[in-house]
Structures are given as C-alpha cells and as structure tokens.
Image: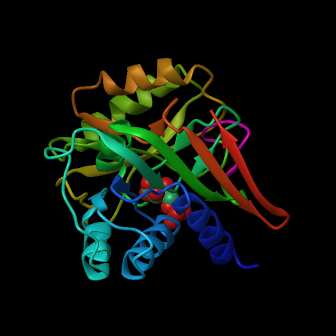
Amino acid sequence: LTQDDLKRIAAYKAVDFVRSGMVLGLGTGSTARHAVDRIGELLRQGKLSDIVGIPTSKKTQEQALSLGIPLSDLDAHPVIDLSIDGADEVDPRLNLVKGRGGSLLREKMIEGASKKFVVIVDESKMVKHIGGSGMALPVEVVPFCWKFTAEKLREVMEGYGGCEAKLRLGGEKGKAFVTDNGNYIVDMYLEKDMGDLWAVSDAILRLPGVVEHGMFLDMASTVIIAGELGVKIKNK
Ligand code: DER
C-alpha cells in the first residue's frame, strides 16, 4: 500500500460518519482531498443528499465546486455538524499540528465550530510529542513587520526549549507565501518537547502580530489512523 492508499483508506472511513442533511467542514490537504472526492461521489450516486460544505481553503472550495458539492460559509452556518481534515502531527492525547498546507486559520475556525471533528491520517503522522516530527509548527502572522513578530516568537519559545523561526516562502522565487487571508506564515522548528502546550499557545497568541498557530489542542473528537496493518480509530 502506498502512503496515498493509506490516506484514501482513512478518508473513506471518515466519510462513513457523514449523514444526509449534514453541514460539513471540508478539510485541506492531500488526505482531506480524498474525503471531499468521496463525498462528491456519494452525492452523485444519490447515496448522500442535502449536504452543505464549508470549505477550509480556496483550494478545497475549488475542488468542492468542481464536484458539485453545495457550498456555504461560517456566517450562514455558525455551527457545523462534522468536519473532516488531515493533520501533520498527532500526539498520544490527540493534540494536532496542522497548517503545513497554509490553511490553519480557516481550518481552526471551522473545525472549532464543529460538533464533531474527525481527523484522518496515515500512520506516519503519529508523534510522541508535538513538534516531535522535526517539521514546522506554522504560525500565521500579519505581513506588517513580520521580522519583529518572528523575533518575538523566538524570544517566547526560549522558555519552551527554543526554536528557529523562518518565513515561509511561496510560489515566486524568494517571495513570501501568502495565505488565503492575505497573511504570512512563520514556521517554527522546535528543538525539544515544549511541555505545557496550553502555556505555549497562550504565549504565542499574546503577541500582537500573531493571527493564529497550528497547534489544535483538545479539538479532535476522533482520529482515524490508516497503517500497513489496518485502520485504527482513536476517540477523545
Ligand atoms: O495544512 C493542513 O492543515 C493539512 O490539513 C495538513 O495538516 C495535512 O496535510 P496532508 O493530508 O497533505 O498531509
């Protein structure tokens, strides 16, 4: 089984939770893409009906539109029945890192407004502690004086094991990546287990130039993990 097979297996399993008439948060990334495809397929086959999708990115909005999934937004649907999305890291307490695709703000808003949030991963995303994959912990920041904010992030993180903070670059050579919301992303690379994640979250969010970070703490209801030996479902 390829990694993409595992992603598809997890995604299809999550779509089993979907019922006709639901308002669904549609995730972003290569795993969530399979879930959105599957929802579109079931709608086309008439096995699902009366679904309203709330996309977590412009990319997912385009995908859902191409599949004919009816779309709306949080203003029209402030409470969402079920969101399905991927993750970059999952720790033993089902805390997540998300946002390596750059959609963390809209994802966190939509998934935070959901009665149920099902996370779909292949087994490579499981970590012992957040930041443990050595990959980025994204922080969305305003473009205004982003260097100042990045320096403040480094200072804050000195109290939690230290980190390197780098501006995420986008399509055009050397240019900053710009999120759907017109902001930048500073990727933090952590050196060790941060310990109290809520304290880290509060410290980061207190910085005025910070919009949001990619730690999704105590938000997942269920995590579906597809591995070589089969599928595991972990509930909060
Ligand atoms: O950027 C994101 O938040 C994505 O959902 C990410 O967390 C998972 O992306 P993947 O399914 O492509 O690995």
Compared across the picture, whether 192 is left or right of 35 comes to right
Can residue 6 be spotted in the picture? yes
User: In what quadrant of the picture does the N terminus appear?
Assistant: bottom right
The residue located at (45%, 65%) in the rendering is: 29
The residue located at (58%, 19%) in the rendering is: 196
In the rendered image, residue 215, in percent from the top left (x then y), is placed at: 47, 37
Main secondary structure found in the magenta portion: loop
Closer to the camera in the image, 192 or 124? 124
What is the quadrant of residue 193 in the picture? Answer: top right
Q: Does 130 appear in magenta?
A: yes
Closer to the camera in the image, 170 or 87? 87
What is the quadrant of residue 155 in the picture? Answer: top left
Closer to the camera in the image, 55 or 169? 55
The relative height of residue 146 versus residue 1 in the rendered view (above or below) is: above
Q: Does 134 appear in magenta?
A: no
The relative height of residue 138 versus residue 113 in the rendered view (above or below) is: below
In the rendered image, residue 164, in percent from the top left (x then y), is placed at: 50, 42
Can residue 100 be spotted in the picture? no
User: In what quadrant of the picture does the C terminus appear?
Assistant: top right
The residue located at (31%, 62%) in the rendering is: 51
In the rendered image, residue 61, in percent from the top left (x then y), is placed at: 26, 68
The relative height of residue 182 versus residue 173 in the rendered view (above or below) is: above
- Residues in magenta? 126-131
